[in-house]
Structures are given as C-alpha cells and as structure tokens.
Image (tube, rainbow, N blue to C red):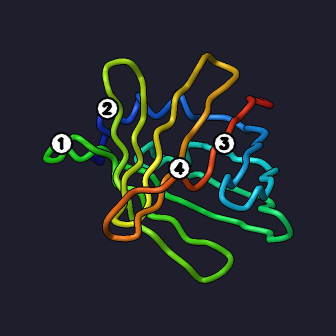
Amino acid sequence: MSHHPIPPIENKRLDALVGHWHTRGKVPASDLEIVGTDTYEWPIGGFFLVHRADVRIGDDHVQVIEMIGPYDPATGTYPMRSFDNHGSFATMRASVDDDGVWTFAGDTERATLVITDDATMSADWERTDAATWHPWMTMSFTRLS
C-alpha cells in the first residue's frame, strides 16, 4: 500500500475563500474602477489553494494566477506565489487571526482581507515607497457560487 501525504489541517482555514466571486473596487489615487472575478479552488491533493483573478483596472486587463499554501508551521503563515499576464510575479505570506481577518504581506504590498459572511468579503491593499505604506486599492467581493 502506498503512503499518500495528508495536507496540513491548517489548510482548512483557507476553505473560507473557496468559491467564485464578483470583484469590484477602486484605486483611490486615480479613481480607476476595478471590475471582474476572483476564483479560489482546491486542486487535487488539497495542499495548494489556486486563486485566479480576471479583472479590469480602468482600461487595463489584469489576469493573475496564484498558489497559496501549504501552511508553514515554522512561520505560522501560508506562502503565496502569484504570476500575472504582464510578466510580473510576487511572493507574499498569508496569515489569519483568531477573528478570521486575513493579512497578505509582501515586501512592497500588503492587504487586509475581511470575510464578512459566507457571501461577502472586502480587502484594503497598500503599497510602500520603502518608507511609508500608502493606500492602493479597496476591493469588495460578492460570492457567485
């Protein structure tokens, strides 16, 4: 009989994100509107949550694929690696507090994501100029499925 690894139990906390979401938002500095969809799903195995974003930020079409996980007990976080249709990539770490508030943190950008209920969530994104964090995007998500 072959041994199959089991995903860390902490990965279950990511279940709150799973689904297909209608995405709306704004870039306050430029008044650009953000509209599109975000999808979070578990591929086979349950070790990595796959996040796909397909949005318009003003006239710019942005598509992102991101892998989240698995949980890293040494840091208490979920590694995140994202790649977009403009050739950019980023690494961040996700963590969640006891109230279910998520933080996505990288070297130059970070977000606080609040899951309001089973049907809605919101996120505030910031970017840094190496000295100060500045508001970047405000987002809201409504579950489609």
* CA–CA distance in space, label 3 to label 4: 8 Å
Give the label, 1 or 3, closer to the camera: 3
Residue 125 numbered tag: 4
Q: Are marks 3 and 4 in contact (CB under 8 Å)?
A: yes
Residue plotted at (36% across, 60% down): 132
- Decide: is 77 above or below 105: above
Circle 1 or circle 4, nearest the eye? 4
Q: Earlier in the sequence, mark 3 or mark 4?
A: 4
Q: Is 50 displayed left or right of 27 in the figure? A: left
- The mark lying in front, picked from 4 and 2, is 4
Looking at the rendered structure, the secondary structure element under dot 3 is strand
Query: What secondary structure is found at the residue carrying circle 2?
Result: helix
In contact (CB < 8 Å): disc 1 and disc 2: yes
Mark 1 or mark 3, earlier in chain: 1
Residue drawn where x is 60% and y is 83% of the image: 87
Q: CA distance from mark 3 to mark 2?
A: 26 Å
- Residue 76 x %, y %: 21, 40
Q: Secondary structure at mark 4?
A: strand
Q: Which residue is mark 2?
A: 10
